């Protein structure tokens, strides 16, 4: 799947198309009744009632703009130990093959943008070679920000083994290679591409704005996890670090882009547009 944004072709690179999350654990404000009220549009693609589980994907976006090949989010990665889900631990995903199908080899990537440093957004920062974690994209500059790196380190220092491992195997090798560059959360990346602060899920979470001509698309990372958050924009995931900030960021974003031509590029479901529906919103998903 690809999205045309003016002269820029943004390709979706799927890593895991079969991810499932317990809905009531993932969205603590949800109830079985509030979920059932949305079955008419969620079933069967977005919810599994037999498991009471959200259907989700893990994916990245890749495109060329301003003479640079840009990759947004690097998913879970292969051979990574101790991940949150058993199927993500020591995984063997065809991510590199899917990236190649979109027309890009790892050495072609010039800029890597992780919207935030969670395990399903930063894993392919590195890959295992001869028992050593090395940067997957050896010619790329990896951009992050001080708040995001501090947040990751704080989670690890608080005892989170997952985040300790993520730092050790997916971030530190990029630090040691000299490829990690710290920038502001509104940094202009290259022609037509800029970061936008979207804090809440993590302190330094950013979105990525892609503009060409009259067209705009925004890769939203985990500002939004699932289409039901358009109907319930105040629902945070259980992983949002700054809950009140996350709710405000999400609602402000939806207010801004609803009923416009802005394309939304989510990390965990299909590209879409947003429309207003009463006091809330609805996503119109690409098929």
Image (cartoon, rainbow, N blue to C red):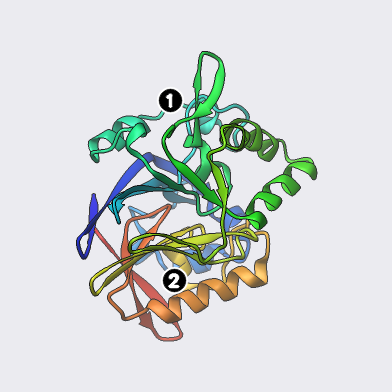
The residue positioned farthest toward the right in the image shown: 158
Residue designated by label 2 = 230
Q: Is residue 87 left or right of residue 241?
A: left
For residue 41, which quarter of the picture? Answer: bottom left
Q: Looking at the picture, tell me which residue is in the foreground, 22 or 249.
A: 249
Q: Earlier in the sequence, mark 1 or mark 2?
A: 1
Q: Looking at the picture, tell me which residue is in the foreground, 102 or 37.
A: 102
Residue designated by label 1 = 92
Q: Which residue does the image show at 50% across and 63% down from the upper left?
A: 187
* Image: 29 above or below 12: below
Q: Which residue does the image show at 57% across and 64% down from the upper left?
A: 31
Label 1: element kind: loop
Q: Is residue 189 left or right of residue 162?
A: left
Label 2: element kind: helix
Alpha-carbon span between mark 1 and mark 2: 33 Å
Q: Which residue does the image show at 41% across and 35% down from the upper left?
A: 139
Disc 1 packing (10 Å; few <14; some 14–19; many ≥20)? some
Where is residue 18 drawn, in percent x and y?
Answer: 40, 40
The residue positioned farthest toward the bottom in the image shown: 278
Where is residue 135 drawn, in percent x and y?
Answer: 50, 31
């Amino acid at each position: 799947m690809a999205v045309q944004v003016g002269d820029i072709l943004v390709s979706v690179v799927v890593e895991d198309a079969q991810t499932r999350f317990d809905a009531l654990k993932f969205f603590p404000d949800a109830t079985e009744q509030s979920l059932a009220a949305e079955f008419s549009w969620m079933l069967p693609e977005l919810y599994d009632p037999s498991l009471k589980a959200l259907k989700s994907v893990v994916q990245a976006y890749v495109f060329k703009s301003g003479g640079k090949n840009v990759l947004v989010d690097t998913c879970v990665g292969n051979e990574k130990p101790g991940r949150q889900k058993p199927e993500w631990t020591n995984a063997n995903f065809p991510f590199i093959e899917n990236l190649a199908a979109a027309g890009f080899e790892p050495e072609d990537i010039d800029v890597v943008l992780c919207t935030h440093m969670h395990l399903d957004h930063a894993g392919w920062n590195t890959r295992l070679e001869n028992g050593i974690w090395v940067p997957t994209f050896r010619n790329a500059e990896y951009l992050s920000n001080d708040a995001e790196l501090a947040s990751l380190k704080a989670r690890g220092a608080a005892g989170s083994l997952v985040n300790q491992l993520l730092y050790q195997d997916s971030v530190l090798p990029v630090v040691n290679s000299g490829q990690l560059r710290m920038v502001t959360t509104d940094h202009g990346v290259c022609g037509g591409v800029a970061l936008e602060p979207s804090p809440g899920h993590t302190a330094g979470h950013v979105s990525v704005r892609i503009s060409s001509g009259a067209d705009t698309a925004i890769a939203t990372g985990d500002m939004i996890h699932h289409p039901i958050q358009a109907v319930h924009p105040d629902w945070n995931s259980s992983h949002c670090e700054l809950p009140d900030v996350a709710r405000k960021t999400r609602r402000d974003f939806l207010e801004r882009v609803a009923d416009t031509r802005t394309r939304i590029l989510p990390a965990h479901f299909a590209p879409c547009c947003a429309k207003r529906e009463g006091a809330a919103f609805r996503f119109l998903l690409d098929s």
